[in-house]
Image: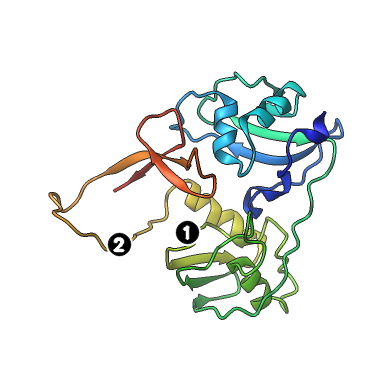
Amino acid sequence: MMNDSFDNIEDLPEDELTEGQEDSGLYEHYRFVADKGQGMIRIDKYLAMHIVGVSRNRIQQAAEANCILVNDNPVKSNYKIKPLDVISVVMNRPPRELEIIPEDIPLDVVYEDDDLMVINKPPGLVVHPGFGNYQGTLVNAVAYLLKDTPEYDAKDPRLGIVHRIDKDTSGLIVVAKNAYAKAHLSAQFFNKTTKRQYVALVWGAIEEDEGRIEGNIGRDLKDRMLMTVFKDGEHGKSAVTH
């Protein structure tokens, strides 16, 4: 039953996929950490919003087969997610290895040293390989750019792109060239000691010059390829922009 629980298990974006093997012989295919502002919702709803192309029925089957763990303990589909819960989907077969093919895609490198580089990503370029975009991504381009760097391996999660921005958004992306840089840069982003500034064009009558935008962002319930903002706390992850 475990082998039949998910059809698209390999479609996880590269930065969320782990390949650790548990002592029980189970392999982790998906791993999520609930946001500290996450509302309490059923785990089958949560996973349906975070995994592309998988129905709630499939998720419920996986839960019945003890394939879904929360904080290393199997849970059923009616389990309510709590803030900072660690959710894993495990199976008795390893995940398909995502091959990163170096591609000669022109990049605008605005800064580089021995530890990192900063790339000005153009709009229209997907950052990480994933569902529907296994090639032609920024990761493929970086793999080509650093193909002669002995320490760099595009498939090593300890290296590479530290954060992401949307496909249609342009902006600066930080790439770690070694494990030391990746660990420290990731910690800065996690602890929000970095400052990120976004520029957008708006139209209409804007009443305030500044303010706070708050909502829950998650995958659209009807079109899993789209992201949307939910009004209530039952869906998505809490997001705040000042």
- What color scheme is it? rainbow
Q: Does 197 appear above or below 152? A: above
* Residue 227 locus on image (x, y percent): 46, 47
Name the residue nearer the viewer: 106 or 9: 9
Q: Secondary structure at mark 2?
A: loop
- State the residue at coordinates (65%, 28%): 57
Neighbour class for label 2 at 10 Å: few (<14), some, many (≥20)?
few
Neighbour class for label 1 at 10 Å: few (<14), some, many (≥20)?
some
Q: Does 169 appear above or below 83? A: below
- State the residue at coordinates (50%, 71%): 118
The residue at the far front in this view is: 222
The reply to whether residue 178 is visible in this rendering is yes
Horizontally, residue 56 falls left or right of residue 192, namely right
* Residue 207 locus on image (x, y percent): 12, 49
Q: Quadrant of the N terminus?
A: top right
Q: Does 208 appear above or below 201? A: above
According to the picture, the residue beneath numbered tag 2 turns out to be 200
According to the picture, the residue beneath numbered tag 1 turns out to be 165
